[in-house]
Structure formats: structure tokens, C-alpha cells
Image (cartoon, rainbow, N blue to C red):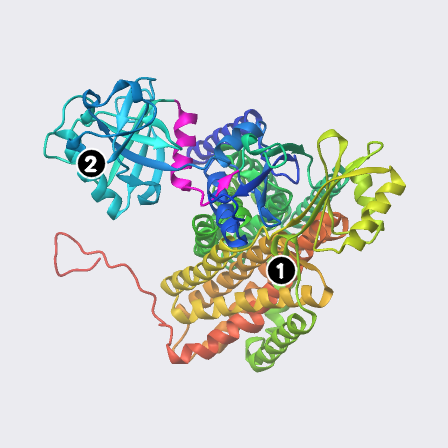
Amino acid sequence: MSRGILVRLLFVVALLAACAAAAWSIQPRLGIDLEGGSQITLTVLSEEEGEEPTAEQVDQVVEVLRQRVDGIGVSESTIVRSGSDRIIVELPGVQDPDDALDVVGRTAQLEVRPVVDQSTIDPTVLGTIVECSEAEDDAQCQAADDQSGAPIVMGPVALKGDQITGAAAEQPQNSTGWAVTVDFSGSGSDAFGELSKTAACATGDAGRIAILLDDEVISSPQVTVACGASITGSTQITGNFNQSQASDLAVLIEGGSLPLRIASEDDGADIAPDVRTIGPTLGDSAIEASAEAGVIGLLLTGLFIVFVYRFVGFLATVALATYALISYAMLVIVGATLTLPGLAGFVLAIGLAIDANVLVFERAREEYAANRASGLRRALQVGFNKAFSAILDSNVTTLLAAVLLFFLASGPVQGFGVTLIIGTVASMISALVVARVFTTAGVQPRWVNRKPKITGLANVGRVRTWLERKRPKLVQRRNVFLGISGAAVVLAVAGIATQGLNLGLEFTGGRNVVYATESPIEPDRARDVIADAGFPEATVQSADAGDISVRTGRISDEEEQQIRDALDAEVGVTDVVTDDNLGAALGGELLRNAIIAFVLALAAQMIYLAFRFKWTFGASAVLAMAHDVVIVVGVFAWLGKPIDGVFLAAALTIIGLSVNDTVVVFDRVREKWWGSKDDDEFIDVANDAVVETLPRTVNTGLGAMFILAALTILGGDSLQDFALALLIGLVVGTLSTITLATPLLTYLNPFSPFGREKKEKVVRDPTDSGAVV
């Protein structure tokens, strides 16, 4: 083994050891479907006594609370309006819901005031509203204790929380404590600038500025800039904070003031916040079934890859195991929330991660067949080099979509973006680093080179041999394929229009009823009982004191009675603890953000492909992606399957599947066109590219289908619809590359022909300004 390979192998071992240490030592953050969590019920009150809050006002409170929950690092949370004046907040994995309630439920009215010289104020009125001296224009002042307990008097409000654009906890330089950096809007910056300028020239208490949160002084620092100077743009709140305190304060400030008041215990026990612990939304049997299906699918995928690619296939399968380790370690390090759909996405990504290796092995087979004398190692190196651009482009397009989802979306869509980023990065490390080191080292020994057939690289395979002999004219049938694609879209749209979409709880809202029972019942058994009563899609969780929580779509009182009667016959129902009508969890701002992120993701992918290829390639790929999603939605409409948050994650995954396959084919089209002759037609070159990449398409597709089929058949109700959507999307996305994306490219190319000459980077010889080397 050469020294270079040995060094790279040691690097891979060190990387895997670090990932294993992180995976072992850091506890994962589990979603509410796997671990359960805390449920907080809040009552919203109008600031004006006697007035009832409107639904629109309560929805505004929901959006502010969602920002706060995201700010304290609780991903995959659920925040919904219940009735006209209540909000239910579910926080997965939160161990101390009282601490979460302190941050989530605070009104957080932020004010900034000047501190007044106390020498002009009667000390007997401290703690009340007092009149300032004539020097203060007789405006009202407020007396209170500062953060250290010392009395101060403050002047009128100079600026409020709505003039603040952001806040972040950080450690100031040369300091051991924590502070909160606050950024101002234009008007806020002007107001704070005037305030600090006045304080800078004052003496004593008048040289201070007070910052209040909910009428409590949280900081009253001395302004230390020179007289005549001012502080604009941003400032820092200090106050001997630890990291947790600074982070909570930053969340409150950036989250903004609540437009309505949250009821407290002082308002009465009937409307005080209710905090309870709830069990996972999925039962142990569903989780076990999904785990077993994932393991079976992975074993089948591994066996298939070993069967096709033999020794290097075995090494690639070992590399897939490292992918699982790397992605899990990255997940726990960044603190992402692990949910069952997220797990399924990772399981799927493990199958799709083999795609990069399949690309490399097929390229290596071509090279070895063309130049056997160079040996297996050379063939493998050429395979990695030639496959690199396709691997890079397909992963970058996926990363672009994932990053946009993370920054622009919120809630579960944002969480999906996190897992997609982690999965994509981990797959690239696995394929381009780990698998390369393993396979390169594996083909080094002499005994391997003496028997090249055992490597799986010595022959091009039966599928490729048949294709090379038949050379089917696929792209030349583009009119037929486009007609079939168009008919499929029409059929899908017809299903959506005539059958409608069976929107899930996240989109429609529903009903949540908590039952007290005479004797305990396991949630898994309760799920079976309620499913037998005609509500198989109901979400059933355990609650405090042995209660059972049942969440369904919008049902009538008669249907609720059916559920109650079924539970009563099983264990006896003694009381209905709560009966709430819930709003949509994926409504309003969250849906708008998701749609915006989705559209921008498509635009970013098209721009990237236009940059890497040409606008004709980008437009063809994006139209194919939209076609794939529409067809999957149409199939679900015809089958009456639910369109919920899990399906939304599946739809986003389908986009990745589609563009991945299309980019691989387009990369081969570009390569062959650059190497073509002047009399070659673009459509013929495109057809050759499709035919030559079919072995990779078949092998990658089958590898992923083993996992998805296992999840669909064996994964239980919780994952079957998710896996079914991905399975349909995988088939449609693979076919659309041949039947839609490539035919569209051949139609668009005459309008803006793709250059036949590859643009080479020109490097000039510094010793001869006229020579090109």
C-alpha cells in the first residue's frame, strides 16, 4: 500500500473515530413522535377589559410564539390555535416545561428610557409614577429598582420593542460574561442615538440609560462615549448574564412583543396556563416495524450492490455504514431534532448515497474495458475523476434547495432542510472520501489484479452489453414521450380537481379530546380500538394521570361520541378532560414561507444549472421536477391518501430525486456533445447519453426501491404513505428524465444552441506575454 493511500486511510479512521465518539457521548434530540414532550395550553386575553380577542389577533400571537420556540432551539414543535382564545404549544423532548413557559408565555414589552437625576425627586414617592422637574418638561417619570436593587428614576419612553430588528447572545471581547447585542431599525437607531448623545454629556444617574422588559429594569448601563458622540445602529445589554440567561433574553427581544396578553395564575385557575407531559404520537409497535423495515431494506440494498459490483460493491456497502455514522454524528452535534420521517429520509439517503459509487463504478468499467493494460487502480481513478462533475452538480443543487428551506421556511419544513443538508454533506463525504479510500486500497493487492473479475470492474455488465448491442432510439420518440407525460399531468390534475385533496391535520386543523379512563390503557391498544371505530388516521397519545389524548380531523359530535363509546367499552371513560377545536399547524405564515422557499429553491436550481450547463438545461430540469411533484400529488388525490406534513417532506425529497437523476444524464450529454463531430446531431448525442447512463439509472433505482418497498410494505401505518410517495416519486422522477427532461432539452437547444467546444481555462506563461501554455 502506497504512503499516500495509507495517510488517507488513517485520516478516514480518525474521522470515523471522532464521529463514533460524538454519536456515543451526545444524546440525540428526539421529536414528539418518538419521545413525547410537553404540552402547554395558553389562554389569550385582550388588553382592553371586556373585549374578546379576534381569531386574527390570536394567529398573530401564534406566529410570535413560533419565533420564540425556534429561538430557544426546540425544532419540530407544534403551535396551533384552539378555539377563539386558546393556543396549544407542544414541545418535543422538553424536560422542564415550566422554564419553556417562562420564555414562551411572557408578554415581553420592551422599553428604553433615560435615567433621571434623583436629586430633583422626592424619595418618598419612589416606586410610583412621579412628575419630573421642570428641567424634564414636567413629563411623567417612573421610579423603580434597577437590576442590582438600587432605586432609580426614569424619564419617558424613548423607543420600544418594535423599533428593534434583531438580538443575539454573545461574549464580548476581553470579557468572561455574556451580553445581548441589540440591532435597531432606522427610527430606533435615530432615537437611541439622541438618547445616548444626551446621556453622554450628563453626570451622575442622568448619564445612564435604562432598558426595561415587562416594566422590569434588566439593564441600566452608564453611557461611556465622549460628550457629543452617540450610539447608533446597535448596542449591547450587559448585566452579569450567563449564556442561558443571555440567550433567553435575546429570544424575547427578537421575538417581539405579543400583541395580546397571556393569562397567568393571577387571572384565575380556569384560564391559567396548563402544563402537562404527553407521550409520543407513535407507538412502540410502529417504531419497531419501521426500524425492522429499514434494516431489511438496507440489507437487500447491500446484497444487490454486492451482487452487481462484487468486491468494490462490498467496499461501497461498508462505506454506506460509515455514511450512517457520519450523518448521525452531524445530527447530534448540530442539535437537530430526529423524527420518524427524518429517520426515513436518512434511510432513503443511505440507499441513494450509493448512486455516487454506482456512477464511479460504471465509469471505471468503461475505462477498464477501453484500456485494460492500465490496471484496476487507474480505471478506478478515472472513474472518480469523470464522475466527479455529475456528483458535484447533483449534490450542489440539493444543497441549494436545503439551505433555502432552512433560512426561509419554519417549523417542520425548516427541520427537513436541516436533515437534508446533513444527509447531503454526509453522502458526499462517504462517496468521495471514505469509499474512494476503501476501494482504492482494495484494488491495490496483486492477487486482486491477477483476478480482476472478482472486483466487479472487469466487465461492463449484462445491461450495458445489451444496450450497446441494441442501441434503442429513446429520445427520438420524444413526441410520444411528451404526449404520455402531458396525459399523465392532465390525469393528475383531473384527480386533484374532481377528488380534491385529503388535507391532513396540519393543514385543516381538527379536534383534540382528552379522556379520563377507569383503568389504564396502553396507547398502542387505544390506537387499535379507535381505528376499529372508523378513525385509523387519529393521533393517540398518553397524557398525565393515565389520560388518553385523541387528535383527529374535523369531526362532528356524533363521531366524537363513537370514539368515546369505543374507549368506554374497552376500559371505561369517566370524564372528558378537554375538548378543543384546533387550528391549522401548517397555516398562515408557515405555509407562505414554505411556498416561497419552494419556489426560490426551484429558481436557485435552475440558475445553478444554467451557470453550469445552459439555461435550456436548467429550464428542462425544473419543468421535469414540477411534473414529478404534480403527478405524485395527483396519485394521492385519486387514492384518497392524506396530504400532510409528512407528505410535504416526501414532496421535497422527490424534487431531490428528480434533479439528481436529470443532472447525471445532462452531465453525460454535455460530455458527449463536447467530444462529438461536426456532423453529429444533438438529438442523437442526447440519446446516446441516455442509453449509456441507463445501467447507472437501473442499479441506483433498484437499490433505493428495495428500501422504499420494505418501508411501504412493512413500515406500519406511520411510514407507509411517506414511503409510497417516495416510491412513486422515484419511479416517475427516473422516467421523466428520459420522457420529459431530455426531450425538452432537444426541443429547446435549437433556440439557444449549446456550444460544441469545451471552454478551457487559459493560463499565460509569465515569461512570455504572447504565449499560451
| Residue 336 visible in the displayed image | yes
Badge 1 or badge 2: first in the primary sequence:
2
- List the single residue furthest toward the right: 569
What residue span does the magenta drawing correspond to? 242-262
Rounded to the nearest angstrom, the CA distance separating label 1 from label 2 is 61 Å
- In the image: residue 668, left or right of residue 85: left
| Front residue (pair 534, 468) | 534
Quarter holding the C terminus is bottom left
Residue 2 in sight in this render: no
Are there few (<14), some (14-19), or many (20+) residues within 10 Å of tag 1?
many
Residue tagged by mark 2? Answer: 195
Numbered badge on residue 730: 1
Residue 247 in percent (x, y) is at 41, 31
Numbered disc in front, either 1 or 2: 2
Q: Amino acid at mark 1?
A: Leu
Crowding near the residue tagged with mark 2, few <14, some 14–19, many ≥20 C-alpha atoms within 10 Å: many
Check the image and report above or below for 289 versus 638: above
